[in-house]
Amino acid sequence: MIEANGLRKTFNKGKVVAVDDFSFSARDGQITGLLGPNGAGKTTTLRMLYTLLKPDAGCMRVDGIDPEVEPLKVRRLLGVVPDSRGLYDRLTARENIRYYARLHGIGRKETEKRINEFSQVLDMDEFIDRRCDGFSQGQRVKVAIARALIHDPRTILLDEPTNGLDVMTTRSLRGFLRDLKSQGRCVVLSTHIMQEVAALCDRIVIIAHGRVAAEGTADELLARSGESNLEDAFVKLIGSDEGLLA
Protein backbone atom coordinates (compact mmCIF):
# COMPACT_ATOMS: atom_id res chain seq x y z
CA MET A 1 0.00 0.00 0.00
CA ILE A 2 1.12 3.53 -0.77
CA GLU A 3 0.14 6.67 1.11
CA ALA A 4 1.26 10.16 0.12
CA ASN A 5 0.25 13.36 1.86
CA GLY A 6 0.96 16.95 0.90
CA LEU A 7 3.79 16.23 -1.51
CA ARG A 8 5.47 19.24 -3.06
CA LYS A 9 8.35 19.37 -5.52
CA THR A 10 9.81 22.39 -7.28
CA PHE A 11 12.66 22.92 -9.71
CA ASN A 12 14.79 25.85 -10.83
CA LYS A 13 15.10 27.24 -7.28
CA GLY A 14 11.38 27.07 -6.68
CA LYS A 15 10.36 28.86 -9.87
CA VAL A 16 8.81 25.74 -11.44
CA VAL A 17 6.25 23.88 -9.31
CA ALA A 18 5.93 20.30 -10.56
CA VAL A 19 3.89 18.84 -7.68
CA ASP A 20 1.95 20.94 -5.18
CA ASP A 21 0.18 19.62 -2.06
CA PHE A 22 -0.43 16.26 -3.73
CA SER A 23 -2.09 13.49 -1.69
CA PHE A 24 -3.33 10.06 -2.70
CA SER A 25 -3.39 6.42 -1.62
CA ALA A 26 -3.06 3.16 -3.53
CA ARG A 27 -4.33 -0.08 -2.03
CA ASP A 28 -3.23 -3.68 -2.32
CA GLY A 29 -5.24 -5.75 -4.78
CA GLN A 30 -6.09 -2.70 -6.88
CA ILE A 31 -4.77 -0.84 -9.91
CA THR A 32 -4.59 2.88 -9.23
CA GLY A 33 -4.20 5.22 -12.19
CA LEU A 34 -2.53 8.63 -12.13
CA LEU A 35 -4.22 10.30 -15.07
CA GLY A 36 -3.19 13.65 -16.45
CA PRO A 37 -1.81 15.48 -19.47
CA ASN A 38 1.92 15.63 -20.12
CA GLY A 39 3.58 17.88 -17.57
CA ALA A 40 0.89 17.37 -14.94
CA GLY A 41 3.32 15.96 -12.35
CA LYS A 42 2.76 12.22 -12.73
CA THR A 43 6.36 11.21 -13.36
CA THR A 44 7.68 13.54 -10.67
CA THR A 45 5.31 11.97 -8.16
CA LEU A 46 6.47 8.46 -9.04
CA ARG A 47 10.12 9.50 -8.84
CA MET A 48 9.58 10.77 -5.33
CA LEU A 49 7.89 7.51 -4.35
CA TYR A 50 10.79 5.39 -5.59
CA THR A 51 13.35 7.74 -3.97
CA LEU A 52 14.89 9.19 -7.13
CA LEU A 53 13.71 12.66 -6.06
CA LYS A 54 13.36 14.10 -2.58
CA PRO A 55 10.14 16.06 -1.93
CA ASP A 56 10.39 19.65 -0.74
CA ALA A 57 7.47 19.01 1.60
CA GLY A 58 4.99 16.31 2.54
CA CYS A 59 5.35 12.68 3.58
CA MET A 60 5.08 9.22 2.01
CA ARG A 61 4.72 5.65 3.16
CA VAL A 62 5.26 2.44 1.18
CA ASP A 63 3.91 -0.50 3.17
CA GLY A 64 4.29 1.71 6.23
CA ILE A 65 7.92 2.64 5.52
CA ASP A 66 9.09 6.22 4.94
CA PRO A 67 11.20 6.41 1.74
CA GLU A 68 13.13 9.39 3.09
CA VAL A 69 14.11 7.55 6.27
CA GLU A 70 14.75 4.09 4.79
CA PRO A 71 15.25 4.54 1.03
CA LEU A 72 17.08 1.25 0.47
CA LYS A 73 14.37 -0.72 2.22
CA VAL A 74 11.70 0.94 0.10
CA ARG A 75 13.63 0.22 -3.10
CA ARG A 76 13.66 -3.45 -2.17
CA LEU A 77 9.89 -3.38 -1.70
CA LEU A 78 9.13 -1.72 -5.03
CA GLY A 79 9.13 -2.89 -8.63
CA VAL A 80 9.62 0.12 -10.89
CA VAL A 81 9.15 0.48 -14.65
CA PRO A 82 10.43 4.01 -15.39
CA ASP A 83 9.44 6.10 -18.37
CA SER A 84 12.91 5.74 -19.89
CA ARG A 85 12.88 1.91 -19.40
CA GLY A 86 16.61 2.20 -18.60
CA LEU A 87 17.89 -0.95 -20.30
CA TYR A 88 21.55 -1.60 -20.93
CA ASP A 89 21.58 -1.90 -24.70
CA ARG A 90 24.85 -3.85 -24.88
CA LEU A 91 23.42 -6.58 -22.65
CA THR A 92 20.89 -9.19 -23.68
CA ALA A 93 17.42 -9.15 -22.22
CA ARG A 94 18.36 -12.07 -19.98
CA GLU A 95 21.53 -10.30 -18.80
CA ASN A 96 19.58 -7.12 -17.98
CA ILE A 97 17.16 -9.07 -15.79
CA ARG A 98 19.91 -11.22 -14.28
CA TYR A 99 21.88 -8.12 -13.26
CA TYR A 100 18.94 -6.77 -11.24
CA ALA A 101 18.39 -10.15 -9.64
CA ARG A 102 21.97 -10.11 -8.39
CA LEU A 103 21.49 -6.60 -6.99
CA HIS A 104 18.60 -8.00 -4.96
CA GLY A 105 20.68 -10.92 -3.74
CA ILE A 106 18.74 -13.64 -5.57
CA GLY A 107 20.67 -16.87 -6.14
CA ARG A 108 21.68 -17.98 -9.64
CA LYS A 109 19.39 -21.01 -9.78
CA GLU A 110 16.34 -19.07 -8.59
CA THR A 111 17.19 -16.21 -10.95
CA GLU A 112 17.24 -18.44 -14.02
CA LYS A 113 14.00 -20.09 -12.96
CA ARG A 114 12.26 -16.72 -12.63
CA ILE A 115 13.68 -15.40 -15.89
CA ASN A 116 12.39 -18.43 -17.75
CA GLU A 117 8.95 -17.99 -16.15
CA PHE A 118 8.80 -14.33 -17.17
CA SER A 119 10.00 -15.18 -20.65
CA GLN A 120 7.03 -17.48 -21.10
CA VAL A 121 4.43 -15.27 -19.44
CA LEU A 122 5.54 -12.13 -21.30
CA ASP A 123 6.25 -13.98 -24.57
CA MET A 124 9.96 -13.10 -24.64
CA ASP A 125 11.43 -16.43 -25.76
CA GLU A 126 12.19 -15.10 -29.24
CA PHE A 127 14.42 -12.27 -28.00
CA ILE A 128 15.42 -13.15 -24.42
CA ASP A 129 19.04 -13.85 -25.47
CA ARG A 130 19.40 -10.95 -27.93
CA ARG A 131 21.09 -7.66 -27.12
CA CYS A 132 18.59 -4.94 -26.29
CA ASP A 133 20.02 -2.51 -28.82
CA GLY A 134 17.43 -2.28 -31.59
CA PHE A 135 14.55 -3.67 -29.53
CA SER A 136 11.03 -2.43 -30.30
CA GLN A 137 9.14 -0.43 -27.67
CA GLY A 138 7.09 -3.50 -26.80
CA GLN A 139 10.17 -5.65 -26.30
CA ARG A 140 11.81 -3.01 -24.12
CA VAL A 141 8.72 -2.70 -21.93
CA LYS A 142 8.53 -6.46 -21.43
CA VAL A 143 12.17 -6.64 -20.36
CA ALA A 144 11.68 -3.65 -18.03
CA ILE A 145 8.66 -5.33 -16.42
CA ALA A 146 10.47 -8.64 -15.91
CA ARG A 147 13.43 -6.79 -14.43
CA ALA A 148 11.16 -4.81 -12.10
CA LEU A 149 9.41 -7.96 -10.84
CA ILE A 150 12.39 -10.30 -10.56
CA HIS A 151 12.53 -9.86 -6.77
CA ASP A 152 8.78 -10.49 -6.35
CA PRO A 153 7.73 -7.04 -5.07
CA ARG A 154 4.25 -6.45 -3.67
CA THR A 155 4.06 -2.88 -4.97
CA ILE A 156 4.65 -1.98 -8.63
CA LEU A 157 4.99 1.50 -10.16
CA LEU A 158 4.71 1.88 -13.93
CA ASP A 159 5.29 5.14 -15.78
CA GLU A 160 3.44 5.30 -19.13
CA PRO A 161 3.75 1.51 -19.61
CA THR A 162 1.88 1.31 -22.93
CA ASN A 163 3.45 4.36 -24.55
CA GLY A 164 4.38 3.46 -28.13
CA LEU A 165 3.06 -0.10 -27.99
CA ASP A 166 1.02 -1.74 -30.73
CA VAL A 167 -2.50 -2.98 -30.11
CA MET A 168 -1.64 -6.63 -29.50
CA THR A 169 1.21 -5.86 -27.10
CA THR A 170 -1.01 -3.42 -25.24
CA ARG A 171 -3.72 -6.06 -24.83
CA SER A 172 -1.14 -8.56 -23.57
CA LEU A 173 0.24 -6.07 -21.07
CA ARG A 174 -3.22 -5.25 -19.76
CA GLY A 175 -3.84 -8.92 -19.08
CA PHE A 176 -0.53 -9.18 -17.24
CA LEU A 177 -1.36 -6.17 -15.04
CA ARG A 178 -4.74 -7.69 -14.18
CA ASP A 179 -2.92 -10.86 -13.12
CA LEU A 180 -0.72 -8.80 -10.78
CA LYS A 181 -3.83 -7.24 -9.28
CA SER A 182 -5.45 -10.65 -8.78
CA GLN A 183 -2.36 -11.71 -6.83
CA GLY A 184 -3.13 -8.96 -4.31
CA ARG A 185 -0.36 -6.61 -5.40
CA CYS A 186 -0.57 -2.83 -5.33
CA VAL A 187 -0.21 -1.53 -8.89
CA VAL A 188 0.16 2.17 -9.71
CA LEU A 189 0.41 3.36 -13.28
CA SER A 190 0.71 6.85 -14.66
CA THR A 191 -0.76 7.58 -18.06
CA HIS A 192 -2.20 10.28 -20.26
CA ILE A 193 -4.18 7.70 -22.24
CA MET A 194 -7.86 7.61 -21.34
CA GLN A 195 -8.38 4.06 -22.56
CA GLU A 196 -5.83 2.77 -20.07
CA VAL A 197 -7.64 3.99 -16.98
CA ALA A 198 -11.02 2.96 -18.36
CA ALA A 199 -9.80 -0.57 -19.10
CA LEU A 200 -7.63 -1.19 -16.04
CA CYS A 201 -8.03 1.08 -13.04
CA ASP A 202 -10.06 0.48 -9.91
CA ARG A 203 -9.37 4.02 -8.75
CA ILE A 204 -8.35 7.07 -10.75
CA VAL A 205 -6.46 10.12 -9.52
CA ILE A 206 -6.73 12.99 -11.98
CA ILE A 207 -3.73 15.34 -11.85
CA ALA A 208 -3.61 18.84 -13.27
CA HIS A 209 -0.86 21.42 -12.65
CA GLY A 210 0.70 19.25 -9.97
CA ARG A 211 -2.47 18.96 -7.90
CA VAL A 212 -5.26 16.43 -7.48
CA ALA A 213 -8.19 17.70 -9.53
CA ALA A 214 -10.42 14.75 -8.65
CA GLU A 215 -10.22 11.11 -7.58
CA GLY A 216 -12.46 8.09 -7.29
CA THR A 217 -13.77 5.21 -9.38
CA ALA A 218 -14.73 5.82 -12.99
CA ASP A 219 -18.41 5.81 -12.00
CA GLU A 220 -17.77 8.29 -9.19
CA LEU A 221 -15.94 10.66 -11.53
CA LEU A 222 -18.75 10.45 -14.07
CA ALA A 223 -21.33 11.19 -11.37
CA ARG A 224 -19.31 14.09 -10.01
CA SER A 225 -18.84 15.68 -13.42
CA GLY A 226 -22.34 14.97 -14.70
CA GLU A 227 -20.87 13.64 -17.95
CA SER A 228 -21.58 10.35 -19.71
CA ASN A 229 -18.03 9.45 -20.75
CA LEU A 230 -14.67 9.59 -19.02
CA GLU A 231 -12.99 11.92 -21.50
CA ASP A 232 -15.63 14.61 -21.08
CA ALA A 233 -15.53 14.07 -17.32
CA PHE A 234 -11.76 14.54 -17.33
CA VAL A 235 -11.93 17.81 -19.28
CA LYS A 236 -14.66 19.19 -17.04
CA LEU A 237 -12.92 18.18 -13.81
CA ILE A 238 -9.60 19.79 -14.72
CA GLY A 239 -11.44 22.79 -16.14
CA SER A 240 -9.61 22.93 -19.45
CA ASP A 241 -9.87 21.73 -23.04
CA GLU A 242 -6.05 21.51 -23.14
CA GLY A 243 -6.16 18.14 -21.47
CA LEU A 244 -7.87 16.17 -24.23
CA LEU A 245 -6.18 12.80 -24.25
CA ALA A 246 -5.41 10.11 -26.79
Image: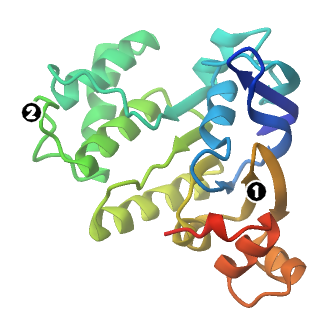
Q: Residue furthest bottom?
A: 228
Q: Amino acid at mark 2?
A: Arg
Residue 29: % across, % down: 69, 54
Which residue does the numbered mark 1 point to in the structure image?
205
| Circle 2 Cα neighbour tier, 10 Å, few/some/many (<14 / 14–19 / ≥20) | some
Q: Amino acid at mark 1?
A: Val
The quadrant holding residue 182 is: bottom right
**Frontmost residue, 44 versus 162:** 44
**Element under disc 1:** strand
Q: CA distance from mark 2 to mark 1?
A: 38 Å
**Frontmost residue, 21 versus 215:** 21
Q: Is residue 101 above or below residue 119?
A: above
**Apparent side of residue 132 relative to residue 118 in the rendered image (left or right):** left
**Apparent side of residue 180 relative to residue 145 in the rendered image (left or right):** right
Q: Is residue 108 above or below residue 155?
A: above
Residue 213: % across, % down: 83, 57
**Frontmost residue, 237 versus 101:** 237
* Foreground disc of the pair 2, 1: 1
Q: Residue at x 41, y 15 (%)?
A: 106
Question: Residue 130, labelled with which disc?
Answer: 2
